[in-house]
Amino acid sequence: MNVTFFIQVLINGIAIGSVYALMAVGYSLVYSIMSFSNFAHGGVIMLGAYIGYYSGALFGLPIWAAILAAMLGCGLIAITIERAAYNPLRKRNAPPLYYIISAMGTSILLENLIVATIGPNFKTYPPLFTERSIEIGKIAIGKLDLLMLVISAVSLFLLVFLIDKTKIGMAIRATAYNLRASSLMGVNPDTVIFIVFGLGGAMAGVAGVLFGMRYVVYPQIGIITNKAFVGAVFGGLGSLPGAIIGSVLLGIIEVMASAYWSSNLQNLIAFVLLIFVLIVRPSGIMGVSTEDKA
Amino acid sequence: MNLSWYYISGILIFAGINLMAVQGLSLLTGFTGLFSFGHAGFMSIGAYTAAIVTSWLGAPFYVSLLSAGLFAGLISLIIGRLTLKLKGDYFVIATLGFGESVRLLFAFLESIGGARGFTIATSAHHTSLFDVVLVNAIGLIVMVNLIHSKHGRNLKAIREEELASRVIGIDVFKYKMSSFFISAFYAGVAGGLFAHYLLFIQPAMFQLIKSTELTIMVIFGGLGSITGSVIGAILLTALPEMLRFLNVWRFVIYGILVILIMILRPKGLMGGQELRLISWTRRLISKRKGGQA
Amino acid sequence: MKRLLTLLLVFLMVFSLVGCGEKPAAGPKGNTAGDTIKIGWIGSLTGDQAVWGTCESNTLQMLVDEANAAGGWKGKQLELVPLDYRGIAEESLTAARRLTTQDNVIAIIGPNTSGGSIALTPAVETSGVPAISTVGTNPLVTVTEDGAVKPFNFRVCFIDPYQGAVAAGYAYDVLGLRKAAVLYDQSIDYSKGLTEFFEKQFVHMGGEIVAKEAFNAGDTEFKTQLTKIKEADPQILFLPYFFKEVALTANQAEDIGLNVVMMGGDGWPSEQLMKMAKDSLQGDYFVNHLDYKDPAVADFNKQYMDAFGIAPELNGYLAYDAFLVLKAAVEKAENINSVEIAKALETVEVQGITGFIRMDAATHNPVGKDAAILKIEGDEYVFQQKYSIVPVE
Amino acid sequence: MSQLELKNVTKKFGGLTAVGNVDLSVRKGSIHGLIGPNGAGKTTIFNLITHIYEPTEGEIFFEGKPIHQLPTHLISRAGITRTFQNIRLFKDLTTYENILTACHFNAQYNYLDAIARTKRYRVGEEVLRNNCELLIDILKLNDQRDILAKNLPYGYQRRLEIARAVALLPKMLLLDEPAAGMNPDETIQLLEIIKQIQNQFDLTVLIIEHHMDLIMNLCDRIMVLNFGRVLAEGTPQEIQNHPHVVEAYLGEGGH
């Protein structure tokens, strides 16, 4: 196997990794504030893919408008889920693991709601390009992959910028540091949670549309987020750069394992590696380990 | 409508199989405070072990159940050794990774049928309702006795306050390992019952959704309540069947119910309370006796 | 301790007493139709198989309505009892227990997975009700591991070995290709089965498998596998799985510049396939049961389109044939009794929509069903020829 | 001879020295006070003794044996236990269950005994329950026995935590601000209880406290910490008159 092959595989890995990253940042944002794994995130991504599909198919919106519509729609949906399924638990100071169950109920609900209303059929976005790939020497790159990479990079950059450089971002980081203390600093945790779910939902919207555009839309696509979840853990739960780096790394590792070892073991390797990473670095690559405080 | 006992007993057998796994998970989650999304993995290990033991070695059914539990337990010791030091969600995720790995591994192993599945020898015992009830009854007695001992109390202490438990001399890691082992043992036995009920198993039967369903049963019934686990397992196994009249909407309702229980009764149906069936019946009996006298 | 023991004893006594009633009498009596003939169906209405399941249930409801309008079978009206099993094998057993004893159906059509079709065997054997699998292609659906036929399990589809062998034979013989690559879904038995027998046949005939790559159900990215396949430079790429993944594979092959003849099985044909990947699939072949130009097929397609606003999937055709097979058996049986119907099914012969079906009493598989080879040209599936082969053992 | 001995113990968090080069020696049967302003490193010392933190440098000996490498649960098995500044009870268990759990050392039976309810189990449980009753009597928690720990009034929560610690029948008890948040009446009661259990169970006590009356009344010796370093050590009289202490700590106007 030669250099062209390696580069081709690497590009594939980064392309997959960027999808995982878009999904993983939503997890990570919520985790950083609420300290629980939001398993309903996959459901929101799925809804994003549907919103994008219908804004294109029914209203004839161009792709950028479909993405905006999905961001808006998913942001609202994520906020609604927070209000309905998590907020009552927060008011009662329930332990994080109760949230997980509530999230799972939500995820079951969303998937089946779509099956019951829209139906189980696959939906396809209209093709964007007639010529599917550009060739550079012997390497072929899918235009969709490229577009996806660009959109992912832009949205991830905007998100990181928002968190790092703006006042809202600072409030979010303060809240992530300590939910209760932040209220002493004049930050209203309710507002922050509201914003975080909105942002996470918006990112889910982008991820959903890109996923739907590149692949296909059906009620069970939420399951792919399990991988994004692994990516977020790789990077360290609650760390935004960690989620991005971890996801891209996972994408690359997966394709490399498949390219140089065996494609039979691709998924197995991802999960075994997950356990391995946790054993070696119990808080992921970028995660902060915490010592018990007495 | 005329209900068929054959149908209902079929549901009850599954409820019993789930209950066996849920009992173990209840110890882990409700009494030790550890969440696992990998117990379908232990169930599948038990199922394959039991199936192989009866089909290839011709061992009796109950021997196969025991080996299913022990083998699942053995694996849990290895996994526990590696992951029980992880905190909170990281442990949950590690178990999720374990469950998925096991499933993918079974699908990969052609010698035991791979993805196409494993068929149990037709001469093997077929799990009956009686078996399920017997195994669960034994399981319950063991579990209740365990919980009402100092070992059970130590587990509860770990659930409540890990640091304080260490300070009063509880070897937290060792107790977590025991709890993980016992829960894996129960899941393994459940897998054995499952395999011999269907007489055919395939890796696809042990997906992540199975693990989460088991955990939902524990929490639905109420953490820290064995009675709750019994109710949770039976009710939630039967619920999808009872909701059949809703057609495609039945799992929408199922999802809503799960959320509602979390919101309205965050401690689950029983929430740490045990239904004192025995004292209740005794009171009833003594009252009746009093009435006759 | 004592209290618990007492509780246990009471518990056990109650249950073992009731449990005794469960043992079946020697030789099941089966269900006999009352005023109406009840037909059970098990399939996915939810879960990731719901696309196929919904099509089956729609088709059957349409056929039942049609039959009722025409006076029913033997003068009795039909009633379809459809049960969802979410694509989860063990739920098909519970559903079968209900259909056979509570709903008293005279036969079950479905389910659409091999796993589900194998899992319900204990229930149909206890109750003596035949089950006709639509697309359960694993040989073990109708025979045990020792090769003995299961008395109450039937199917109307090909079994895995046949399609795989046909594809290999056609590629080698007719297309004259010698170097093949395979990409398959290692988590579903259909794909594994086809792969196994394609490989066997192709190598047996003198061809070479230059690459064999795998993925898992739920995966959507195949470029790495395809890049590896491209490196191996095959003449034909065999894709034995369902249209959703086939479309993604074909598009991604295009993305990385892998231009090679592709071939697949009956999981391919669907309106969705053409919608998703028509351009990437031009000139590729698949093995199928039927010729879409056949008037019977075209009629059904139109009827289905009119009723549901969407084209039927392959499962619809097979559910259609399962219904025809059942109808023939009911007519042949002296009484509308499930055990007698099962007996009649063993020798039934019908002209189905997917070909001529003659049930083999020794295997409960349809025999003599020719495979059709179709080619994708423009918007059409163009019928090439009927092709049959004796698979290597 | 000293029962507990800290030799040159240092704990650093990142670049920050929480405790630096502390030497401490606690005599058997004494009540030893540990005072100092907030953040002086008092609780850190408790955490180092009970090995919740790993010492960066230095050694800790208990009854002549090194314990700084033992895990927390073995340190309590060796005879040292503690309470927490921010109260860590088993919140969803009752008073009775909290104490009963902590009694677990006093009966030895294994899982199989428990499952089969052997004689060993029954005898063991009997012992545990008797111990538990005794402690409830001594700490006057009779009226609270069936109340969940989280529902107890604050003062009782503190008292229960002490009861839970004593249930281990330790040789040394570390009390971290036991009187925090108590009113003067409760503080006096607490003083009595500490004295009583120290007598009855033959305990060595190491106590962190801000209530100066309590400390001065109770302690045989006192160590004063400031910024992680030992400022002074001596009898209550010596400490009260120590110029550095008066300046750095008592002068602060304190508590």
Image (spheres, grey):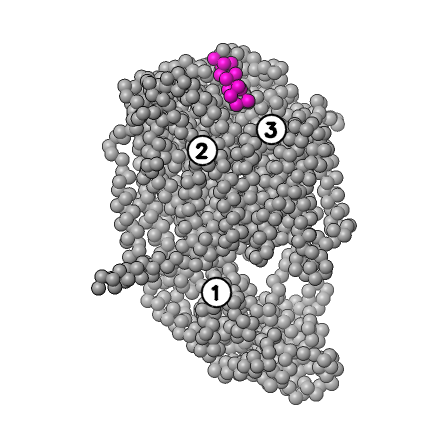
Q: Chain of mark 3?
A: A
Q: Is C342 situated left or right of B31 in this image?
A: left
**Could you say which disc has been placed on residue D93 in the image?**
1
Image: C350 above or below D128: above
Indicate the secondary structure of the residue bearing disc 1.
Answer: loop
Which residue is at a point 61% across and 48% down the rendered structure image? A82
Kindly identify the amino acid type of the residue bearing the numbered disc 3: Lys
Say if residue D27 shows up in the picture.
no
Which residue is at a point 48% across and 53% down the rendered structure image? B268
Crowding at label 2, few (<14), some or many (≥20) Cα neighbours within 10 Å? many
Quarter of the figure with residue A4:
top right
Q: Chain of mark 2?
A: C
Quadrant where the C terminus of chain C sits is: top left
Q: Chain of mark 1?
A: D
Kindly identify the amino acid type of the residue bearing the numbered disc 2: Asp
Query: Is most of the magenta stretch helix, strand or loop?
Result: helix
Which residue is at a point 75% across and 47% down the rendered structure image? A162
Image: C201 above or below A56: above
| Depth order, front residue of C196/D90 | D90
**Are the residues flagged by discs 2 and 1 in contact, CB closer than 8 Å?**
no
Check chain identity for marks 1 and 3: say if they share one.
no
Range covered by the magenta-colored residues:
C296-309
